[in-house]
């Protein structure tokens, strides 16, 4: 696995796509009516919680798997015990939705959905690379964890119902 791919994975592609979708959403929000009507104080609280949640996710991710160890072994603990891509998930499932609500326009809610779809597509090459590198261990890990959102217990591989 080359060093660039090991360190950055799908990040640069995802960021470029995210920037394009962000600019499109900003352009559309100025031309299409659709304010959500949330009071500014509520939006500020949502944004603050989202930013703190994102920061916590980033810190947890880097503590779970230091940058120098990326791609050298399969991390299955800490943040990686919940989702396969916790750094991306911190932004996609916490920070960006909070920002969308703060911006107070329905276009930005569509923007959140569009970003999730784009990142699900952008992450495929990185997951293929991980499968080549770690084989069956990766497949078992992927069956237990969601990409960006944790899987419910009944969807995890090996889950046994108490019935």
Image (spheres, rainbow, N blue to C red):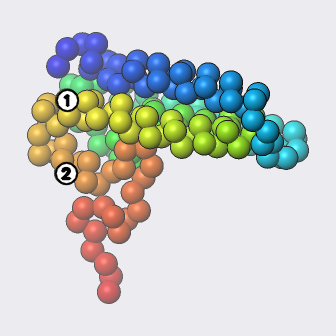
Location of residue 130 in the rendering, given as x and y in whole percent from the top left corner? 21, 33
Left or right: 49, with 14 as reference point: right
For this view, does 48 lie left or right of residue 89? right
Across and down, in percent, residue 102 comes to 75, 37
Residue 120 appears in the figure: yes
Dividing the picture into quarters, in which one does residue 4 lie?
top left
State the residue at coordinates (45%, 49%). Answer: 149
Q: Name the image quarter holding the N terminus.
A: top left
The x, y position of residue 47, in whole percent, is 73, 37
The residue drawn where x is 67% and y is 39% is 107
Query: Label 2 vs label 1: CA separation?
Result: 15 Å
- Place of residue 121 in the rendered image (x, y in percent of width and height, measured from the top left): 35, 36
Q: Is residue 70 above or below residue 114?
A: above
The earlier-in-sequence mark between 2 and 1 is: 1
Q: Is residue 99 above or below residue 113?
A: above
Foreground: disc 2 or disc 1: 1
Q: Secondary structure at mark 1?
A: helix
Q: Is residue 59 visible?
A: no
Q: Quadrant of the C terminus?
A: bottom left
Q: Residues within 10 Å of mark 2 (few under 14, many from 20)?
A: few
Q: Toward which corner of the image does residue 46 lie, by quadrant?
A: top right
The furthest residue to the bottom: 163
Q: Which mark is residue 129?
A: 1
Residue identifier under label 2: 140
Query: Which of the 4 image quadrants contains residue 112?
Result: top right
Residue at position x 24%, y 48% from top?
141
């Amino acid at each position: 696995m080359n060093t660039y791919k090991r360190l950055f994975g799908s990040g640069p592609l995802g960021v470029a796509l995210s920037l394009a979708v962000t600019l499109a959403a900003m352009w559309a929000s100025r031309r299409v009516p659709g304010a959500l009507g949330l009071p500014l104080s509520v939006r500020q609280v949502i944004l603050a919680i989202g930013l703190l949640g994102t920061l916590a996710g980033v810190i947890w991710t880097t503590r779970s798997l230091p940058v120098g160890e990326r791609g050298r072994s399969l991390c299955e603990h800490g943040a990686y015990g919940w989702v396969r891509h916790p750094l991306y998930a911190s932004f996609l499932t916490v920070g960006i939705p909070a920002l969308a609500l703060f911006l107070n326009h329905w276009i930005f809610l569509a923007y959140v959905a569009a970003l999730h779809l784009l990142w699900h597509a952008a992450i495929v090459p990185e997951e293929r690379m991980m499968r080549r590198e770690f084989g069956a261990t990766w497949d078992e890990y992927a069956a237990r964890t969601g990409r960006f959102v944790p899987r419910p217990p009944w969807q995890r591989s090996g889950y046994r119902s108490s019935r």
